[in-house]
Amino acid sequence: GETIRTVLPLPEDEDSWKDLHVMFATANGTVRRNSMDAFANVPSNGKLAMRFDEGSDDRLIGVALLTEDDDVLLATRQGKAIRFAATDVREFQSRTSTGVRGMTLKADDEVISLSILKGFDATPDEREAYLRAAPWKENEIAPTLAADRVDQFASAEQFILTVCANGYGKLSSAYDYRRTGRGGQGITNIDNIGRNGPVVGSFPVAHEDHLMLVTDQAKLIRMGLNSMRVIGRNSAGVRLL
């Protein structure tokens, strides 16, 4: 009953692996972090990377490379998300432990996406000020931040694309996802799940990217993300397909 879950490209220069970590995330909200060095020598029949409690229905949903300067974003099927610092998860020396709680979930929810966001040193007030007068904002609010600080925010900005099963989705600034401690219930990632259907993907994108949606009936649509307006994190989204 075991299947491959993730294909993860690694830097060819193994000397650089010492600066990298591997983050694992499960459907039940468990996370764990190991140094990439722990997987430098893997035998042909594989190596145990993480243990699950006996009898648990949990499963791995994502694996990603990151550094200690990065943040982790977990998104759930019912429209919640949590962002926390990579260092909130201690580095595990053992590969046979179950990990720690990354997110507390309601009974009918599960984690469906693990994403890595670049850390950016800013206060909550600065983030709010930038979001009120961001360059992509369709208003004429004058920025309260200095021009060079606005430029720093804009050059480091990432965007989160969230897509739901019924063809709705949205694009939001990653600054809208405030960093909290791991283990909480998270914040709203997208609203109106009743209309939208469950979340099927939530991940960082760039404005120059294209989005391809494929349905279970093999219908396909492709669109440029530069045609999507950036909207608030707790919005219901728009019809994509």
Image (cartoon, rainbow, N blue to C red):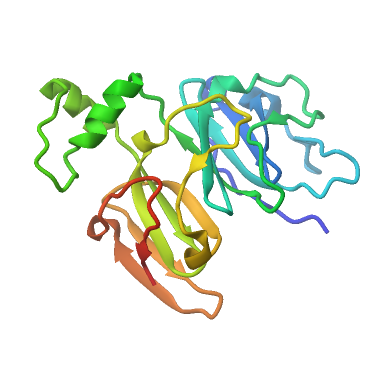
Q: How many marks?
A: 0
Q: Position of residue 43 (x, y in %)?
A: 78, 37
Q: Nearer the viewer, residue 21 or 116?
A: 116
Q: Is residue 177 left or right of residue 181?
A: left
Residue 136 appears at what percent x and percent y? Answer: 19, 44
Residue 238 visible, this angle:
yes
Relative placement, left or right, of 195 versus 231 is right
Question: Residue placed at 17% from the left, 28% from the top?
Answer: 151
- The location of residue 241, given as percent across then percent down, is 39, 72
Which quarter of the image is occupied by the N terminus?
bottom right
What residue occupies the far right of the structure in this picture? 54
Quadrant in the rendering for residue 221? bottom left
Using the image as rendered, state which of residue 147 and residue 141 is in the foreground.
141
Is residue 11 among what the camera can see? no
Q: Relative to residue 77, is residue 46 depicted above or below?
A: above
**Residue at image x 50%, y 74%?**
215
Q: Nearer the viewer, residue 30 or 12?
A: 30
Residue 34 left/right relative to 46 = left
Percent across and percent down for residue 104 are 66, 37
Q: Is 63 located above or below residue 13 in the figure?
A: below
Q: Identify the residue at image location x=78%, y=32%.
A: 98
Q: Quadrant of residue 40?
A: top right
Determine the residue positioned at 13% across, 45% down.
Answer: 139
